[in-house]
Every structure is written in structure tokens, then in C-alpha cells.
Image (cartoon, rainbow, N blue to C red):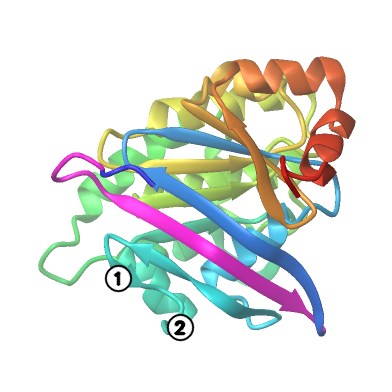
Amino acid sequence: MTTPPAGQHTLVVTDLHAEVAGKEILKGVNLELLSGELTALMGPNGSGKSTLAYALMGHPKYKVTKGSVLLDGVDLLPLSVDKRSKAGLFLGFQYPQEVSGLSLSKFLWTAYMQRHTAETADSDKFGKELKTNLGMLEMDETLLKRSLNEGFSGGEKKRVEVLQMATLSPTFAILDEPDSGLDIDAVRAVGETVAKLHRPDAGILVITHYQRILKYLKPDRVHVMVDGVVALSGGRELAEQLEAKGYDWVRLGAAAPSPGA
């Protein structure tokens, strides 16, 4: 791991192991995220990408058995999900849940208030920023009155996840396959909006199978997960290689014995 400049936020994952129902999925993940950078995490199905996202956020189904996760030097692993959120971590779900009876506007305001006090909350600013973000995401304002994700299309649900990220302004945001199930126009809208929302004092990790959303995001770093570990890292050109060659060559490289073994 490199030493970041003073004042730069870091999320450092070291030798992280995690299991689901007794089966080990993460087998020693090492990953460093820096504020000001947009990072892509790619890999085939079953490689552990979503497990990593849930383990970082503290989902009880995903049991961490070894390793550490430090956000600006603070160990996240002992913290509950809500405390990890307040520490500055956000997860956008691959499969957002519907919540009947809770309007989208009420949900967003409640989430906003979780990061503010009565003294720091600004309802006028919240409303203006919400309207701006709806416009960037090409979302109809009438969605605010509807129950959270209830009857929403797949594209609308993914846009709502990005809208939550914009509302909470986390230090580090993890977006789990924000492009899955979206048509070309929706991928463009989500990708361009995430890029616009990216702040110099925050970092974003986008988990994806495909290069298509990355042409709008233009990541600073690309990591590839294979069999529960980060097997390869590089710049945005790595995503283009993966698009052209697939993942088999990465698998073969990860499985090859090290020199002298």
C-alpha cells in the first residue's frame, strides 16, 4: 500500500477473508481506495465482488474471519451497519428492495437527517440539491411521492441508489453493479451522473462485469477479482483488455505457480 498525501481519505482492506454459510468466499482481499479516485472492480460471476461489498458494509450473512478494514485508520469491522454508514461508507445495492408505505422523498430526508443534526440540516438546500440530482439522473419528480422502489423499473431502482449516494455524500461509496439490467440510455445516464457526483474529497468503487459503464466513468484504477482475491490491477486500459479477451487469461495467471514454487 502506498502512503497517501496528508489530508487524503483512505479505505484500506488488508488480507480480508469472509465466508457465507460456512463457505469461504473471500480468501485474502487486499485493496486500497483513495479519495479523489474512481475505482472499478471487475471479475466473473462468483469471484466474490458482491461478497466484498456486503462484508465491508457489515451484512450479518457475511462473516469476516480474518483481516482488517480501515477507513482513515478507524477499524470498521467492530462497527454496526449504521455506524459504518455514519463513518462515511455507503453501499448501493445490486438488487434494491421495495418498501411499501415509505415514500421516496421521506426515505431520502430520513437518510439525510442521519448524517446531520437539527442545527446542521438545511431543508432548502436539501430540496434544491434533490431537484438538481433528479434532473441529472433524468428522473421524474413524481417518483418522490411513490413508495420506495415499489413498481419502479430496474433502471429507476438503480437511479434511486445513485440518488441516495448523492443525498448522503459519503466519504467512500460502493456501487454494486449499477449497470446491471439497464438499457444503453440508462447506463449512460447513471454513468454520467456518478461521474458528475464524484468529489475530490470522496472515493467511489464501482463493481461491474462490463466495460460499457466505464467509458462514462473513466476510472483511475481497475482491479480484477478471481476466486476471492484481487488477482490483477491496472489503469482503465485493463477494462478494455477484459472486454476484448474475457477473464480466462486472468484466471490462468492467478492459478499459475509463482517462480521457484
User: Pointers 2 and 1 in contact (CB under 8 A)?
Assistant: no
- Left or right of residue 125: residue 260: right
Q: What secondary structure do most residues of the magenta stretch adopt?
A: strand
The location of residue 63, given as percent across then percent down, is 66, 81
> Is residue 121 inside the magenta stretch?
no
Q: Nearer the viewer, residue 99 or 46?
A: 46
Residue span colored magenta: 4-21
The location of residue 213, given as percent across then percent down, is 66, 25
What secondary structure is found at the residue carrying circle 2?
loop
Q: Nearer the viewer, residue 80 or 112?
A: 80
Picture quadrant of residue 254 = top right
The location of residue 58, given as percent across then percent down, is 55, 75
Q: Is residue 243 visible?
A: yes
Residue found 52% across the figure and 20% down from its top: 218
Residue found 26% across the figure and 44% down from its top: 3
Q: CA distance from mark 2 to mark 1?
A: 13 Å
Looking at the picture, does residue 218 appear above or below residue 101?
A: above
Mark carried by residue 174? none
The amino acid sitting under disc 2 is Ser
Q: Nearer the viewer, residue 123 or 30?
A: 30
Which residue matches tag 1? 74
- Left or right of residue 78: residue 186: right
The amino acid sitting under disc 1 is Val
- Left or right of residue 138: residue 10: left
Which residue matches tag 2? 80
Depth check, mark 2 against mark 1: the one in front is 1
